[in-house]
Image (cartoon, rainbow, N blue to C red):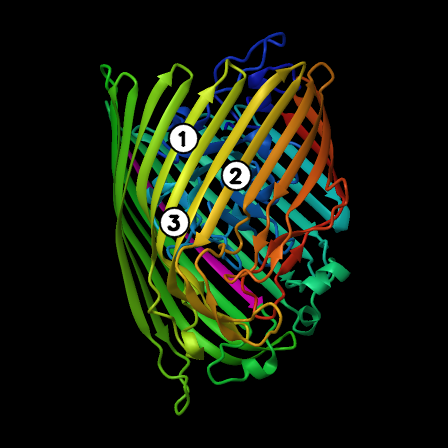
Amino acid sequence: MKLTRSLYVACGGALTMVCASHGFAQQTKPAPTPAAAPVLLPEVVTSATRTERDSFDLPVAIDSVDQRAIQEDKPQVNLSEALNRVPGIATLNRQNYAQDLQISSRGFGARSAFGVRGIRLIADGIPATLPDGSGQAASFNLGSAERIEVMRGPFSSLYGNAAGGVIQLSTADGPLEPTLTGSMFGGSYGTYKGDLQFGGQSGSFNYLLDASRFHTDGYRDHSTVTRDQSNAKMKMPLSTGVVTVLVNTFDQPETQDPLGLSRTQAIANPRQSDPSASTFNTRKSVRQNQLGLVYDINLGGADKLQARTYLGDRQVTQYQAIPLAAQAAATSSGAVVDQDFGYEGVGLRWTHNVSEGERPLTFSTGLDYDRMAQHRKGYINNNGISGALKRDEDNTVTNTALYAQLEWKFAPRWTASAGMRHSRVRFDSKDYFIVPGTLNGDDSGNVGYAKTTPVAGIVFNAAPAWNVYANLGRGFETPTLIELAYRPGGATGLNFALQPATSLHKEIGVKGKIGNAARVNLALFHIDTSNEIVVNSSVGGRTDYKNASTTRRQGAELSAESYLGAGFEAYLAYTWLDAQFTQGFTTNSTNCISTTASTVTVPSGNKLPGAPGYTLYGELVWRHPASGFHAGAEVRANGKIYVNDFNCASADPYTVANLRAGFEQRGKKWRLTEFVRIDNITDRQYVGSVIIADSNNRFFEPSPGRNYLLGLNAQLSF
């Protein structure tokens, strides 16, 4: 599957003009003339091997979403806009910017109540996932993105504490001449976004600066958000290599949280918020600043060295809806979470290439060190006002790893890849909230995890345009600080008894090219997991976890794209996933009928919650280069999603369709584009995501009915 879908667009097929039109200096092969048939370009990725390769030649399921697929006729706000077209990935938009997207890869990460876990997030080589394995996709800047790579399967473990996959965003370089770009869109529910971008080349110095503001009143009540975001990328060649400096900021204050709805509420009025959202004024504020530096050093000959370092800070304040009586308990942490993170890291990688002869070989080895220091406080949420202190602690997480990777074309039609990573993750907690004579004593402590994860894969070139591959490897997934936050039975302090989940991945696949204008990928996978982290209890606004089960994930991923002639392009991505528990266990939670918790046995064969049984994305686009017009239709379908481990309720399957169209006009130094899109054209009422194991049975997060966007982009080069 190639989501790069070529860069042949309405400017008459001129590839270099397309790259310039987005304000980026792309160095690519010459484009066909307007009369030539469109050609799918190689899908260049770096995630699997850490060097640029065509994904067709790799023994992994990996895809690249190109700039046009990210930006054309889209608001460029949420990763779900682009990742819904990636097989194996389920990206569910909660319509709740206080909780971010729900992203899962082959079922990993599906249980996350907020944020992203089980998947490694990377932006321009800098981790966007913290050392504990948690991340926030909202910090990805889509307005300046060149491509997004998505890798599933065991090779993801070479990036560390993430069992399910890797999502890596690459920011574009600046254009060869100074270029100013401004864009604006507006639409339903008081939604708008403005973006200003400036980039260019001054001597050997390349730069791209992007700043944007996004606002929406929200589809649901009590869901207003305003987000300010900036991203800067600067590159300077030195005598020994190239230095890249990356600076980004993210500010999202006082974002309202409408909470989930019960099924009765969702049917009666899907746009409402739960009454407790107003009572407690549930909301979240996030601010993040980050600086990164990547130094690519050419050692001469076949050797290269890359060094990276980064540091940042993140402040999060969240007001939750927990009854005051529950908050008043001696062991309660309150319902206002106040967290201040400082984080930093370094990495060093050496790569050796042997390209002579008929058996080229690439070897790389490196080390990573990442650290975060969290100061966490908890307060009473006194009907929307912060009250008495209930929690005060410092938590430190470090992640240290060594890895090595090899790719060897050992025969004319055979290529082998292998790798290994040894990770050590340590959690330390210092408790300052100690109440003598109560159950709230000194809960300081620590825990460490270590794991070696080997992977191997092989590719056989069955025919010039067809490759068959297989891979095998182990995965490693530690609990996050969120999952360690509470001990079972209402006790205070971190749950140091929780252990990592480990997994064994097996995959086979076929990648094929049909002529120059069609491509198809198929992957079949089977994953067995031990020590799966599951909900132990969810009571009084607090959820604690335990290791209690083995699970099996098996499925198929299919993608195909083609130029059909007469200006038509088609794309299809389909995923079938059977994710189930293979060993029974007990959980103490609500039962979908009563909000009183009780001990329930989850039998073998139950489905993992949060993971749809299937996802489908299809797209048909028609382009008329002479007029600069294009129009497209999209279809998206998701299967049933269970809300908890004992499968007592679920969100129904749904199918929605979208329409979009755009125009382009250009001159020698300027370019204008306009677009309109209508989402959910049949006005389907459906639940787009669920809150796993919600203790109040408010599992459901409804999605919008029919809604629209209008957008304008203007660009001027100097």
Amino acid type, residue under disc 2 in the picture: Thr
Towards the viewer: 73 or 152: 152
Residue 80 is left or right of residue 354, and the answer is right
Mark 3: which amino acid? Ala
Q: Is disc 1 surrounded by few (<14), some (14 to 19) or many (20+) residues within 10 Å? A: many
* Type of secondary structure dominating the magenta stretch: strand
Tell me, yes or no, if residue 7 can be seen here. no
**Proximity of marks 1 and 3: CB atoms separated by less than 8 Å:** no
CA separation, marks 1 and 3? 22 Å
| Residue 100, x across and y down, in percent | 57, 54
Q: Which residue is mark 1?
A: 509
Instruction: Name, please, the residue furthest toward the bottom.
Output: 437
Marked residue nearer the N-terminal end (3 or 2): 3
Is residue 315 magenta-colored? yes
Residue that carries the numbered disc 2 in the rendered image: 575
Q: Position of residue 284 (x, y in %)?
A: 59, 63
Give the answer, above or below, for where 599 lies relative to 521.
below
